[in-house]
Image: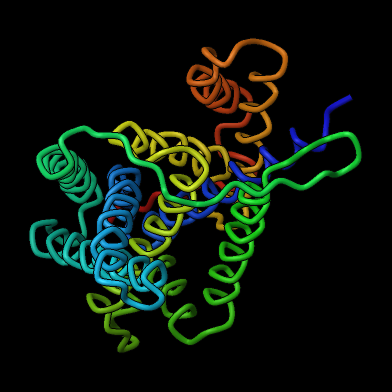
């Protein structure tokens, strides 16, 4: 029988995977660009949070941790906005192919910047370990907080998409870009806003992931797993992204328990292969409609 510790660790992984996968789905739903730089944006947010906290703590600034997180999220929001401004400028008529190539170029650029500034070092957030005794299991409070807060923020983001005017305009833009322009929706501003919002989601996901693991260049590989979770979920389904993140987290932790932790990196690829063979449209089961004009 699986322990409470297993489910808490699974919840933790699902929390930050959900945010990263949701960032991918929001972007892809809006302009069909696959956000290959989501892991690098998350890793950058974690690095900036750590460095800002070290600097602010040294001058004894009150609420240094909170201010550090806000600084990091403001930066990744700006990066997301700039990225999609560049895509709109260089991607002819919203070409998703050009946009995806630009996203890959951004990923390589961010990797180079992080390697230059932090020189490949591994850091950890200075969070005092607190454990809870639940039955016969002893679980880390931080893992529980990361999982609950990650999934709660992901649910709040979906609620914002479904209940706000900006959310309605984003959905209209995803359905039909030309019709959205004719209806007076400021398409470019909305796309840039989606970029900024997705940057914030990726930043929070990266910070939460680093809190329970470590801050390093290797943590950007979480973005690859998030892309797999988004594809498993259906790529255009926000709820599917969360479902894909939860399923991926379960499979990874089952691998750690019953096989070997060395096989964890292989399991997302195998899971993706299974879905592409037996359920190519993902958990949501929504096939995309391609129109030729």
Query: Residue at the spot x=27%, y=68% of the render?
Result: 56
Image-based side of 145 in relation to 99, left or right: right
Tell me the quarter of the image containing the C terminus. Answer: bottom left
Quarter location, residue 285: top right
Q: Position of residue 174 (x, y in %)?
A: 41, 65
Query: Residue at the spot x=58%, y=24% of the render?
Result: 271
* Residue 285 in sight from this viewpoint: no
Q: Position of residue 44 (x, y in %)?
A: 27, 50
The answer to which of 15 and 179 lies nearer the viewer is 15
The answer to which of 290 and 81 lies nearer the viewer is 81
Q: Position of residue 129 (x, y in %)?
A: 60, 46
Query: Residue at the spot x=66%, y=27% of the render?
Result: 253
Query: Residue at the spot x=31%, y=35% of the render?
Result: 122
The answer to which of 147 and 288 lies nearer the viewer is 147
Image-based side of 28 in relation to 247, left or right: left
* Residue 6 in sight from this viewpoint: yes
Q: How is the image coloured?
A: rainbow
Q: How many marks?
A: 0
Image-based side of 164 in relation to 246, left or right: left
């Amino acid at each position: 029988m699986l322990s409470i510790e297993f489910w808490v660790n699974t919840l933790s992984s699902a929390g930050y995977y959900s945010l990263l996968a949701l960032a991918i789905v929001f972007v892809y739903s809006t302009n069909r660009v696959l956000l290959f730089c989501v892991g690098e944006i998350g890793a950058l947010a974690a690095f900036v949070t750590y460095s800002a906290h070290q600097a602010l703590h040294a001058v004894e600034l009150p609420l240094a941790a909170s201010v550090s997180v806000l600084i990091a999220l403001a930066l990744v929001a700006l990066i997301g906005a700039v990225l999609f401004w560049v895509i709109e400028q260089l991607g002819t008529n919203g070409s998703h192919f050009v946009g995806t190539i630009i996203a890959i170029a951004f990923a390589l650029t961010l990797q180079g910047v992080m390697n230059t500034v932090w020189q490949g070092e591994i850091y950890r957030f200075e969070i005092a370990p607190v454990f809870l005794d639940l039955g016969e299991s002893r679980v880390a409070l931080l893992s529980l907080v990361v999982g609950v807060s990650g999934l709660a923020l992901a649910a709040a983001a979906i609620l914002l998409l479904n209940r706000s005017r900006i959310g309605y305009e984003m959905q209209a833009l995803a359905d039909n870009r030309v019709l959205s322009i004719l209806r007076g929706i400021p398409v470019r501003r909305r796309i840039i806003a989606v970029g900024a919002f997705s940057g914030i989601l990726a930043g929070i996901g990266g910070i939460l992931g680093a809190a329970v693991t470590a801050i390093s260049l290797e943590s950007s590989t979480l973005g690859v797993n998030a892309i797999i979770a988004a594809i498993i979920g259906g790529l255009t389904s926000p709820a599917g992204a969360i479902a894909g993140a939860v399923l991926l987290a379960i499979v990874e932790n089952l691998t750690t328990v019953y096989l070997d932790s060395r096989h964890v990196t292989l399991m997302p690829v195998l899971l993706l292969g299974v879905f592409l063979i037996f359920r190519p449209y993902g958990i949501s089961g929504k096939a995309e409609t391609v129109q030729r004009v």
